[in-house]
Image (cartoon, rainbow, N blue to C red):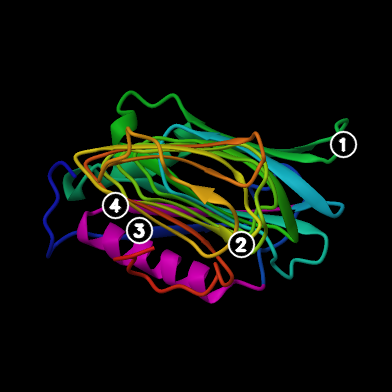
Amino acid sequence: MHGSHPLRAVLAVVLVASLVPFGAGCAGGSSVERGIDHAHQSIAASFYGSVVEERLYELDVDGIIDVDLESFAGDVVIRGGRETKGKAILTATVLAGHGRDRQAEAEASLDEVAVKAEIRRGGDVPVLAVRCTTEHDEPWLLRANLDIELPELRRVRVKTRGGKVYVFENRGACHVHTADGDVRMFTPWAISEDVTLVTRGGEIVFRAFTGTCGTFDVECVNGDVKARVEAGDWRILDRRNDHDTLHATLGTCTNRITIRNVDAKVRVSVVKDPMDYGSIFASP
C-alpha cells in the first residue's frame, strides 16, 4: 500500500465482538481452514502497515439456507456442512491499508465500512443476505474479507471485486462474479441447477459429485481449460472446442454451467470424491 515499508510496518488489531446488529455472541468452533486464513490475513496486513478489525456476527437459521452476498471488495468464503447447530456465523475481517505514515487515518476509516447481515424469510427457504459497503473517499485502500459458516447451504449468489470466492458444499445453483481472485466451487452434491463462475486473472475450479448434469459453456482467454468427468453421458463434440474453450453436455438436464476467465486456467471435475483435493490443481 501507499507509504508502507515491509520491515517497519505496524499492525493494529481491533477485535470487535459488540458490533453485532442481528443476534449476539462469538463465532466459536472455528475450522482449521478459517484459522489459517485469518493468520495469513494478519501476517500479510503487518507487512503492509494495515489496520485490521474483526467483526463477529451470529444469526439463527432453520435448516437449509440460501446466501445472497454483495461486497465492494474482498475475499469471500462460504462453507456449508459446518457443525454450527442452527447458527449462521459470519466473520468480517476489515482491512485499511493506508500505510505506516497514515495509521490514524486508517483506524478512523474502519468506521466507514458497513457490514449488514440479515435473514430474509418468505420464500421456500430463508436467505442470508449480506451487504458490505463503504463511503470512504479512497475505497481502494479498504477491503472486507467475509467468512460464512452454515449448517446446510443450498443456493449462492456472490458479487465482489478484487478478491477470491470459495464456495463449499452448496446443494444448488451458484453464481459468482469477482475480479483478480480465484474462484472455487467444491460440493459433494450432484448439481442440476444453473452455475455461473466469472473472474479475471484467478484460477477457476469447479468440482461436483457424479450425477451432476447440464450444458457446459466455458471460455478462457489467455488460459486453458481441462475437464474430467468420471460418469454420465459426457458429450464434447462441439467444433468450437479448443484448449481454451469447452462446450459440452452432461446428461439430459437443461441447466447451464457457464464459466468465464481471462489470463488464468479453468478446471472442471465431476468425480466420486470432489471434496478430496489438494491446494494445487495442475489437473482436474
Q: Which residue shows up at 70% across the image and 58% down it?
A: 150
Q: Earlier in the sequence, mark 1 or mark 4?
A: 4
* Residue at the spot of label 2: 209
Q: Which mark is residue 124?
A: 1
Q: Along the line of sight, which residue is nearer the eye, 241 or 265?
A: 241
Nearer the viewer's eye, disc 2 or disc 4? 2
User: Is the residue 27 above or below the residue 49 in the image?
Assistant: below
Q: Along the line of sight, which residue is nearer the eye, 153 or 88?
A: 153
Amino acid at the residue labelled 2:
Phe
Amino acid at the residue labelled 3:
Ala
Q: CA distance from mark 2 to mark 4?
A: 40 Å
Q: Earlier in the sequence, mark 3 or mark 2?
A: 3
Magenta stretch encompasses residue 258: no
* Residue at the spot of label 4: 50
Nearer the viewer's eye, disc 3 or disc 2? 2
Q: Element type at marker 1?
A: loop
Q: Which mark is residue 87?
A: none
